[in-house]
Image (cartoon, helix red, strand yellow):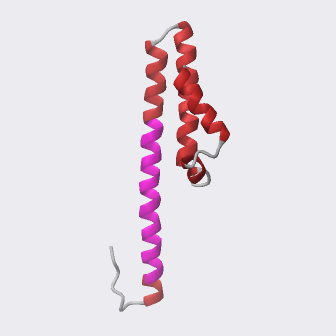
């Protein structure tokens, strides 16, 4: 919703900036909740469908995959992960592929 700019220009500008950030935060929050619920479903499926040793290895693989995803989507580390410069992520990818 845009407010008529003839009312008070500084107020209108501040309001529009606030609404822009509010909408962006709402979108990010919805995406985060959606991803979190998806991860819970995956974790639940692992626990229900496997037994014993498979459950332990599946859980380990899930934790490693979650670490890789978190590092890949982090603002601070995304560019380093893309260039393969973080040793722990490289190791996690090897571990994930070998389980």
Q: Quadrant of the C terminus?
A: top right
Residue at 45% x, 64% y is: 22
Given residues 18 and 28, the one toward you in this image is 28
Whole-percent x and y of residue 94? Answer: 58, 29
Given residues 99 and 36, the one toward you in this image is 99
Q: Quadrant of residue 1?
A: bottom left
Q: Residue furthest right?
A: 87
Give the magenta part as a residue range.
Answer: 13-37
Residue at 59% x, 26% y is: 95
Query: How many numbered marks does the figure carry?
Result: 0
Residue at 46% x, 54% y is: 28
25 in relation to 78, above or below: below
Q: Residue furthest bottom?
A: 6
Whole-percent x and y of residue 83? Answer: 57, 49
Given residues 82 and 53, the one toward you in this image is 82
Judged left or right of residue 71, residue 17 is left
Whole-percent x and y of residue 74? Answer: 57, 50
Q: Main secondary structure of the magenta part?
A: helix
Judged left or right of residue 4, residue 32 is right
Judged left or right of residue 58, residue 34 is left
29 in relation to 6, above or below: above
Residue 25 is one of the magenta-drawn residues: yes
Q: Residue furthest top?
A: 52
Residue at 35% x, 81% y is: 3
Given residues 92 and 33, the one toward you in this image is 92
4 in relation to 91, above or below: below
Whole-percent x and y of residue 2? Answer: 33, 77
């Amino acid at each position: 919703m845009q407010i008529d700019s003839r009312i008070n220009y500084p107020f209108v500008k501040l309001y529009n900036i606030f609404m822009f950030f509010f909408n962006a935060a709402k979108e990010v929050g919805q995406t985060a909740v959606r991803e979190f619920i998806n991860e819970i479903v995956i974790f639940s499926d692992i626990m229900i469908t496997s037994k014993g040793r498979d459950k332990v290895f599946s859980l380990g693989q899930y934790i490693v995959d979650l670490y890789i995803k978190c590092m890949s989507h982090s603002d601070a580390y995304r560019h380093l992960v893309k260039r393969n410069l973080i040793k722990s992520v490289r190791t996690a990818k090897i571990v994930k592929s070998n389980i």
